[in-house]
Image: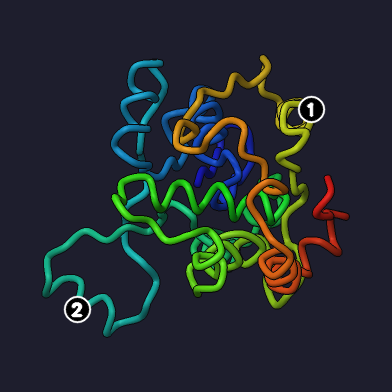
């Protein structure tokens, strides 16, 4: 998640939508006062090798009242005020109203069947005996994509970002964002977390009818909002 005061934007990072790559690319153009939340160690190594700014300005006191303040002082622990995959509701609650209202807010969304396949291969990357993808879809594990997708960029069921970039046309979508916020050069996306999925495995190849229908029901809001279908 990034809040850029330099370019006046808020990037809300959804899950399995190339969010880490986008975040790394955006961090190149951040100023010293901008908020950049930490990502995984392997991905931070990519960011460091590229020479881009890393995590900064993401800790601080939370406005949780007198009791919360006393508890924090008692524990003598510095709290994270901003973190990766933070929801619009939480961000809005922790920044000034004028920043939320004036800054350009955006995120990325992806075909839900494709997202589920991506999550499956990511979650099972180190397992000797992973579940079948059918068993995985039947479990509650895929519910995390709902929470870390549309659940992050909506409040009370309403989309509250200025733009939802579609993963399927991400270069074009990010170019529009780049021009809108005044970044001077096209964003260059590094390859992060993309080596675990077999290249030739499309979601149409791995899902049966039962999995297809379950995902369609779970992600019906995204399918309705963005016109996704199983065949494209």
| Residue shown at 51% from the left, 43% from the top | 2
For residue 6, which numbered disc appears in the image? none
Q: Quadrant of the C terminus?
A: top right
Q: Which one is in front, 123 or 159? A: 123
Q: Which one is in front, 167 or 27? A: 167
In the rendered image, which quarter is residue 201 located in?
top right
Q: Is residue 176 above or below residue 157?
A: above
Determine crowd level at label 1: few under 14, some 14-19, many 20+ residues with C-alpha closer than 10 A.
few
Position in image of residue 88 (x %, y %): 60, 62
In the rendered image, which quarter is residue 97 located in?
bottom right
| Residue shown at 52% from the left, 32% from the top | 21
Residue 168 in sight from this viewpoint: yes
Q: Which one is in front, 138 or 109? A: 138
Residue 93 in sight from this viewpoint: no
Residue reaching furthest bottom?
67
Dot 2: element: helix
Residue marked by disc 2:
71
The coloring applied to the image is rainbow
Determine crowd level at label 2: few under 14, some 14-19, many 20+ residues with C-alpha closer than 10 A.
few
Count of number-bearing discs: 2
Q: Between disc 2 and disc 1, whose residue precedes?
A: 2
Residue marked by disc 1:
172
Position in image of residue 116 (x %, y %): 59, 55
Q: Which one is in front, 63 or 46? A: 46
Position in image of residue 68 (x %, y %): 28, 79
């Amino acid at each position: 998640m990034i809040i850029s005061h330099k370019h006046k934007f808020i990037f809300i990072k959804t899950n399995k939508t190339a969010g880490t790559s986008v975040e790394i690319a955006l961090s190149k153009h951040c100023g010293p006062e901008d908020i950049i939340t930490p990502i995984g160690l392997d991905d931070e190594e990519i960011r460091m090798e590229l020479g881009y700014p890393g995590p900064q300005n993401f800790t601080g006191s939370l406005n949780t009242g007198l009791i919360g303040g006393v508890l924090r002082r008692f524990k003598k622990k510095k709290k994270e005020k901003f973190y990766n995959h933070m929801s619009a509701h939480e961000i809005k609650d922790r920044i000034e109203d004028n920043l939320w209202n004036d800054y350009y807010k955006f995120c990325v969304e992806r075909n839900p069947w494709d997202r589920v396949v991506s999550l499956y291969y990511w979650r099972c990357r180190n397992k000797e005996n992973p579940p079948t993808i059918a068993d995985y879809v039947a479990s509650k594990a895929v519910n995390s994509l709902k929470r870390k997708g549309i659940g992050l960029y909506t409040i009370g069921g309403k989309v509250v970002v200025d733009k939802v970039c579609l993963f399927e046309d991400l270069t074009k979508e990010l170019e529009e964002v780049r021009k809108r916020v005044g970044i001077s050069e096209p964003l260059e996306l590094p390859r992060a977390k993309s080596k675990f999925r077999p290249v030739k495995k499309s979601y149409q190849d791995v899902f049966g009818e039962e999995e297809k229908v379950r995902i369609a029901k779970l992600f019906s809001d995204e399918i309705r909002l963005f016109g996704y279908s199983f065949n494209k």
